[in-house]
């Protein structure tokens, strides 16, 4: 399966999970349902059209250096971009990775919890691991002590809620 076809499938699956069928997704994104159907059959689509579909489904297309896998993937929207969190400053297009890292840098429990709820514990823990690998000097001693404990406690809470 091509990257384009894989991304289209992710977008359609996310839209369906949100109660939006393929035809409604296409119309809401400003394209004809037939266009989406033909693109799925071909396995390719214009990036701008794919991005419009992804946005309509609550996802964004993100490019980052490959780490042994695909170089493109769809990321879910996160409420962390909301100005109330103060994590995106004046840039509304800030990536989920940057928003999560900003939340982790601050070490505010509410923001870290929201990041986990929006993007998943695995994603947030992966961002924390990247921050620690890169030897960021701006990680405070408090963040280094508190964030692992926060993530552990959030994980325990999620586990209890699931059982």
Image (spheres, rainbow, N blue to C red):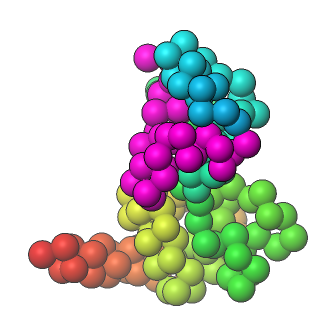
In the rendered image, residue 67, in percent from the top left (x then y), is placed at: 51, 32
Judged left or right of residue 93, residue 106 is left
Q: Tell me the magenta residue range.
A: 1-30
Judged left or right of residue 135, residue 146 is left
Vertical placement of 96 versus 140: above or below?
Answer: above
In the rendered image, residue 12, in percent from the top left (x then y), is placed at: 48, 40
Q: Residue at x 12, y 75 (%)?
A: 163
- Residue 135, located in which quarter of the rendered image? bottom right
Residue placed most toward the observer, 138 or 14: 14
Q: Residue at x 54, y 40 (%)?
A: 23
In the rendered image, residue 144, in percent from the top left (x then y), is placed at: 51, 75
User: Is residue 61 visible to the viewer in this orientation of the structure?
Assistant: no
Residue placed most toward the observer, 147 or 15: 15
In the rendered image, residue 41, in percent from the top left (x then y), is placed at: 49, 16
Vertical placement of 88 versus 38: above or below?
Answer: below
- Residue 161, located in which quarter of the rendered image? bottom left
Q: Is residue 22 magenta?
A: yes
Residue placed most toward the observer, 70 or 24: 24
Vertical placement of 156 versus 11: above or below?
Answer: below
Q: Is residue 14 magenta?
A: yes
Q: Residue at x 47, y 46 (%)?
A: 21
């Amino acid at each position: 399966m091509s990257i384009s076809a894989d991304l289209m499938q992710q977008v359609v699956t996310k839209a369906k999970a949100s109660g939006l069928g393929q035809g409604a997704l296409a119309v809401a994104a400003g394209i004809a349902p037939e266009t989406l159907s033909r693109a799925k059959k071909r396995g390719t689509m214009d990036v701008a059209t794919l991005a419009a579909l992804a946005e309509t489904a609550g996802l964004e297309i993100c490019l980052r250096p490959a780490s042994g896998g695909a170089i493109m993937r769809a990321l879910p929207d996160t409420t962390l971009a909301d100005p109330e969190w103060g994590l995106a400053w004046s840039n509304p297009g800030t990536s989920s990775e940057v928003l999560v890292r900003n939340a982790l840098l601050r070490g505010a429990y509410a923001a870290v919890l929201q990041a986990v709820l929006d993007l998943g514990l695995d994603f947030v823990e992966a961002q924390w691991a990247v921050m620690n690998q890169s030897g960021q000097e701006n990680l405070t001693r408090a963040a280094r002590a508190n964030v692992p404990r926060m993530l552990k406690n959030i994980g325990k809470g999620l586990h209890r809620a699931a059982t």
